[in-house]
Amino acid sequence: MAPTAPAPRRDLVNGLALLAGAVLVGAWLWLRPTDAPGRVAPPPVVLVEEDLPRAADGSASVRVRVVGPAVLQVEVTAPAATEVKVGPGRPVELEPRNLPDPAATTAFTHAGGTTTHEVRAFTTGMYVIHLAPTAAGPLRVRVTKADWRAGPSGG
């Protein structure tokens, strides 16, 4: 028995189905949004939040582990004119106190009350936040880490 030729109606239905599919795909490509959704920055991560006890000389220090690079938001509650230094810690063998390395330190004078300062951490490691207050009062530090790619002020 000889093979029969496919029915022309079946070919027409298959062709129309392929044409309809191509039109739907083309319409979707034409009407889809051209801009990709923006990158949502992750929320800040709290690295440390604590009241600091004073040492015998009245200063206070805290060590913070940073996985860098990062932008650190250092929120300080201290008396006015408190000198704050933030930087990679010195090796314990060289300096038994918690002091940052002077060559890589960001230093500022705190205006009093609670303020936040932005500090860039370029390397991974232990960072030291050292407060040298000139007056009595509470010492509190809260450090959050924002993604360095988010730009200044996390946005």
Image: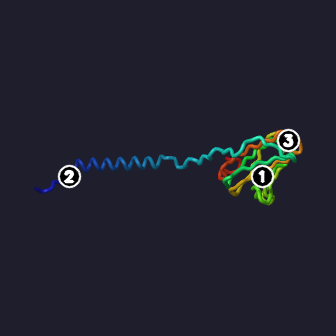
Q: Is residue 43 above or below residue 106?
A: above
Q: Amino acid at mark 3?
A: Pro
58 or 112, nearer to the observer: 58
Labels 2 and 1: the sequence-earlier one: 2
Q: Amino acid at mark 1?
A: Val
Most extreme residue toward the left is 1
Residue under label 3: 79
Residue 100, percent from left and from top = 79, 55
Labels 3 and 2: the sequence-earlier one: 2
Q: Amino acid at mark 2?
A: Pro
Residue under label 2: 6
* Placement of the N terminus among the 4 image quadrants: bottom left
Residue under label 1: 86
How far apart marks 3 and 2 lie (CA) works out to: 92 Å
Q: Quadrant of residue 50?
A: top right
Q: Residue at x 31, y 48 (%)?
A: 16
Residue 129, percent from left and from top = 77, 50
